[in-house]
Image (spheres, rainbow, N blue to C red):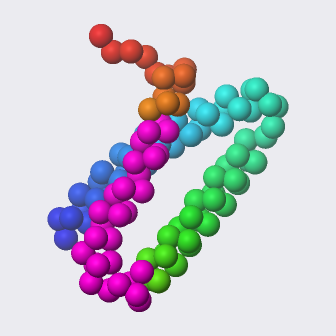
């Protein structure tokens, strides 16, 4: 129960910081290319949901083939999925307008 409560709490902080960066990137691209925001948001939602479906299918297949290993190492694999996102955000954040160097 505590795990789920803390996961929900920290997940909200992680998601809100990621969405802030994403919306600023959308605003910058809109100014640069004159395209509408809803196209970026539609693409984001489309690929997020497609990724969730693919991830769920992969998890079900892995569980069917390697039950014990999936239970044992599934959480570690899920955490490793976020490493590329963190590396990408480290490249994007310094170029955003809301970012400033702390003393």
Q: Give the total of numbered labels.
A: 0
| Residue drawn at 43 percent across, 17 percent down | 100
Q: Quadrant of residue 65?
A: bottom left
* Res 20 seen here: no
Query: x, y percentage for residue 24?
Result: 59, 32
| Residue drawn at 82 percent across, 31 percent down | 34
Above-or-below relation of 59 to 80: below
Q: Quadrant of residue 3?
A: bottom left
Above-or-below relation of 102 to 17: above
* Res 36 seen here: yes
Query: x, y percentage for residue 85?
Result: 46, 46
Query: x, y percentage for residue 11?
Result: 35, 53
Q: Nearer the viewer, residue 85 or 62?
A: 62
Tell me if residue 79 is in the magenta stretch.
Answer: yes
- Left or right: residue 38 versus residue 50 is right
Which of the image's four quarters has the C terminus?
top left
Q: Which residues are magenta?
A: 62-89
The majority secondary structure of the magenta stretch comes to helix
What residue occupies the far left of the structure in this picture? 2
| Residue drawn at 52 percent across, 36 percent down | 21
């Amino acid at each position: 129960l505590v795990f789920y409560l803390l996961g929900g709490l920290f997940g909200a902080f992680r998601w809100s910081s990621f969405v802030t960066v994403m919306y600023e990137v959308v605003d910058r691209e809109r100014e640069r290319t004159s395209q509408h925001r809803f196209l970026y948001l539609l693409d984001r939602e489309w690929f997020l949901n497609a990724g969730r479906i693919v991830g769920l299918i992969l998890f079900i297949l892995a569980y069917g083939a390697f039950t014990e290993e999936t239970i044992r190492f599934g959480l570690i694999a899920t955490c490793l999925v976020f490493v590329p996102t963190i590396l990408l955000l480290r490249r994007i954040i310094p170029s955003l307008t809301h970012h400033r160097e702390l003393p």
